[in-house]
Amino acid sequence: MPSFDVVSRLETQEIDNSIANSMKEIGQRYDFKGSNAKIERNENIITLTAEDELKAKQVVDLLTSHIIKRKIDPKAIKLKNSETASGNSIRQTYDLVEGIDQEIGKKITTLVKSSKIKVQAKIQGNELRISGGKRDDLQKIIELIKELNVEIPLQFVNFRD
């Protein structure tokens, strides 16, 4: 019976590489001369520090462009909070989104059931397994899930016949 998994995974090495490239570019750019802007990752949290709102926005745009260059969906980083830090600087905290939570899993499962295509969807922890009788049905489900436009990056892996 053909099946595939719907997952939301991050390549932490690619995230680290995009942070390193962003920091390198910050060090080389003229508009960041003498700036103390920096980006750090600790587990699934990215902390960004900059002098003001404008520099913080530029650093976020820089990081986002490097993440996109590394073929990671920019939906993978979500702003958690923004606060003023010591020395008139701004500290922003971003969460790295990984795994499909229950709410999104249920949304995808109801979409699959309402499509009237003969497939089954099972939630397995923070992943979904979709199985059906025909490969074509599974490919239609993949297209439906892509059109759903959820707020997290999704990958379709382990496609088996």
Image (cartoon, rainbow, N blue to C red):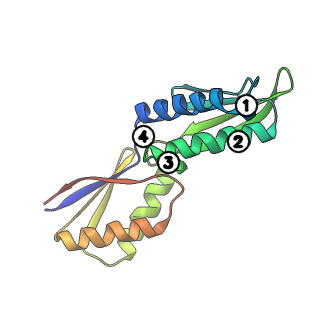
In the image, taking residue 37 as reference, residue 17 lies left or right, namely left
Identify the element where label 4 is drawn: loop
The residue drawn where x is 58% and y is 38% is: 95
Which residue is identified by label 2? 58
As drawn, the residue found furthest toward the bottom would be 116
Q: Are marks 1 and 2 in contact (CB under 8 Å)?
A: yes
Disc marking residue 95: none
Q: Which residue is mark 4?
A: 10
Q: Is residue 159 left or right of residue 146?
A: left
The disc, 1 or 2, on the residue closer to the chain's N-terminal end is 1
Q: Which residue is mark 3?
A: 68
Q: Earlier in the sequence, mark 4 or mark 3?
A: 4
Q: Type of residue at label 3?
A: Ile
Q: Of the residues shown, which amino acid type is indicated by label 2?
A: Gln
Between tags 1 and 2, which lies in front?
1
Task: Specify which label sits upstream in the sequence, 4 or 2.
Answer: 4
Please name the residue shown 29% across and 76% down the image. Answer: 117
Q: Are marks 4 and 1 in contact (CB under 8 Å)?
A: no
Between circles 4 and 1, the one closer to the viewer is: 1
- Of tags 4 and 2, which is closer to the observer? 2
**Is the C-beta separation of discs 3 and 2 under 8 Å?**
no
Q: Earlier in the sequence, mark 3 or mark 2?
A: 2
